[in-house]
Image: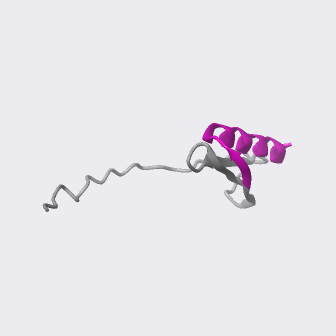
């Protein structure tokens, strides 16, 4: 039995930055996913204010469905939180 191959990978670095939001603006980041697509779905998100301070965070199971359904339901949660 032979083992081999290249176990080393090129490291790629991407510079990211955060820009301060206008005053009285909130930003919501969220994601939805499904295991085994279709499978168990879940969603999570975070709300931050213009200073980047945490306002609210959530994680919730969504039942059974596809990854696309989970993404849509995560967006629905965001709309609910934003209203």
Report the magenta residues as a range.
61-83
In the image, taking residue 21 as reference, residue 13 lies left or right, namely: left
Q: Name the residue nearer the viewer: 27 or 45.
A: 45
Quadrant where the C terminus is found in the figure:
top right
Quarter of the figure with residue 69:
top right
In the image, taking residue 5 as reference, residue 63 lies left or right, namely: right
Color theme of the render: one colour
Residue in the picture at 13% in, 61% down: 2
Q: Name the residue nearer the viewer: 41 or 39.
A: 39
Q: Position of residue 45 (x, y in %)?
A: 69, 53
Predominant secondary structure in magenta?
Answer: helix
User: Magenta span has 4?
Assistant: no
Residue in the picture at 79% in, 48% down: 24
Residue found farthest to the right: 83
Q: Position of residue 27 (x, y in %)?
A: 70, 47
Q: Position of residue 32 (x, y in %)?
A: 65, 47
Quarter of the figure with residue 51:
bottom right
Q: Could one spot residue 32 in this view of the protein?
A: no
Q: Could one spot residue 37 in this view of the protein?
A: yes
In the image, taking residue 68 as reference, residue 76 lies left or right, namely: right
User: Magenta span has 64?
Assistant: yes
């Amino acid at each position: 039995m032979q083992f081999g191959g290249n176990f080393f990978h090129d490291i790629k670095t991407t510079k990211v930055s955060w820009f301060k939001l206008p005053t009285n603006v909130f930003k919501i980041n969220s994601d939805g996913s499904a295991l085994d697509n279709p499978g168990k779905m879940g969603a999570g998100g975070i709300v931050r204010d213009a200073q980047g301070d945490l306002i609210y965070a959530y994680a919730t199971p969504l039942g059974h469905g596809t990854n696309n359904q989970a993404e849509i339901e995560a967006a629905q949660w965001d709309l609910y939180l934003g209203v």
